[in-house]
């Protein structure tokens, strides 16, 4: 493999055929050439999606949609853009998540602002949205004033996705982190949902304004065990907020508290949906089974076949 052009270490100094500012033919760096080289290099740095990473970063630098890169393969990237791209790729090579580098993550076909104050929304969580919307269509779509609560909203991904599709529902979202709520608020405004979504700083359902009967409670809470944290990928462990990942020694402490509080807060016939990890699903199911006001429903699997969403219905 050729030496990569973006490294700044002496042993990886830019080669003569790197994207430098030189003007000879060998140093003409087109969109296509940059993507090819960057994809190869990021693959050696542990990225599990090097081509996608390269495309997202270059599209961000060029201020264009990623798909438009494919119509610009032969266009020469100017020196200023190459310099910005080099720096982003260097940071990605060190493990920094692409979403934090560009400050944006797509979720359920929506663009959301993200920072290190929030967990990066993941495709697995889209499954929770799909399930919640299915239940809404079957049971609540004709109900005026349906009340939905998103516990641990982070960037606001769940609340915003549900508010976008549940046209008449009233959505409330909470998070223990004010920094995360600031990002959620920006995303709510970005999607013109200020009148549809209320935000509260709260540890689970502790805030007094959360009292009452909810038709649906959804949550993607911290569910990683303490002893699992050190084994997480570097781009998760070193960059994403620990408090949004770790759910205690067993990984289920916050989930158990949520189940207990939801049991007394759901309206009759209301639904509880919680994203969970495979290592803590049994404890979550047990917590639901111990609640006299909840009836557990079969746990749903994600696209990889892993247990992912525990669900229950209120009597």
Image (spheres, rainbow, N blue to C red):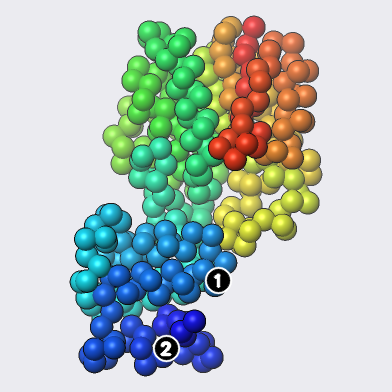
Q: Secondary structure at mark 1?
A: loop
Give the vertical position of 259 relative to 234 (above or below): above
Q: Which mark is residue 45?
A: 1
- Tell me residue 98's x, y (percent): 45, 60
Which residue in the protein does label 2 denote? 14
Question: In the rendered view, would you say 95 is above or below 304?
Answer: below
Q: Residue at x 51, y 52 (%)?
A: 117
Quadrant containing the C terminus is top right
Mark with earlier residue (1, 2) = 2
Q: Determine if residue 203 is in view.
A: no
Horizontal placement of 227 versus 81: left or right? Answer: right
201 up-or-down from 83: above or below:
above
Residue 217 image position (x, y, % from top left): 55, 23
Q: Residues within 10 Å of mark 1 (few under 14, many from 20)?
A: few
Q: Secondary structure at mark 2?
A: loop
Residue at 45% across / 22% down in the picture?
Answer: 133
Q: Toward which corner of the image does residue 290 lie, by quadrant?
A: top right
Tell me which corner region of the image, top left, top right, bottom left or bottom right, holds residue 37: bottom left
Residue 288 has which mark? none
């Amino acid at each position: 493999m050729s030496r990569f052009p973006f490294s700044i270490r002496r042993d990886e100094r830019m080669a003569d055929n790197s994207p430098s500012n030189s003007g000879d033919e060998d140093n003409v760096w087109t969109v296509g050439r940059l993507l090819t080289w960057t994809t190869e290099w990021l693959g050696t740095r542990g990225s599990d999606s090097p081509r996608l990473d390269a495309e997202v970063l270059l599209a961000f630098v060029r201020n264009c949609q990623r798909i438009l890169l494919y119509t610009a393969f032969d266009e020469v990237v100017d020196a200023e853009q190459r310099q910005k791209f080099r720096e982003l790729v260097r940071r990605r090579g060190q493990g920094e998540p692409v979403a934090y580098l560009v400050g944006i993550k797509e979720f359920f076909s929506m663009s959301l602002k993200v920072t290190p104050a929030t967990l990066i929304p993941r495709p697995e969580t889209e499954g929770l949205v799909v399930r919640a919307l299915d239940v809404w269509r079957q049971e609540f779509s004709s109900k005026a004033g349906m009340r939905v609560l998103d516990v641990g909203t982070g960037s606001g991904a769940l609340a915003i996705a549900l508010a976008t599709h549940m046209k008449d529902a009233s959505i409330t979202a909470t998070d223990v982190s004010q920094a995360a709520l600031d990002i959620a608020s920006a995303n709510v405004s970005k999607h013109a949902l200020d009148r549809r979504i209320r935000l509260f700083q709260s540890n689970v359902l502790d805030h007094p304004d959360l009292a009452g009967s909810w038709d649906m409670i959804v949550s993607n809470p911290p569910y990683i065990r303490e002893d699992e944290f050190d084994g997480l990928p570097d781009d998760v462990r070193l960059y994403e907020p620990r408090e949004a990942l770790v759910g205690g020694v067993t990984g289920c402490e916050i989930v158990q508290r949520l189940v207990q509080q939801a049991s007394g807060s759901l309206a009759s016939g209301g639904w509880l949906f919680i994203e969970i990890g495979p290592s803590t699903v049994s404890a979550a199911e047990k917590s639901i089974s111990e609640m006299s006001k909840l009836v557990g429903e079969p746990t749903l699997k994600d696209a990889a076949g892993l247990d992912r969403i525990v669900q229950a219905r209120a009597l």
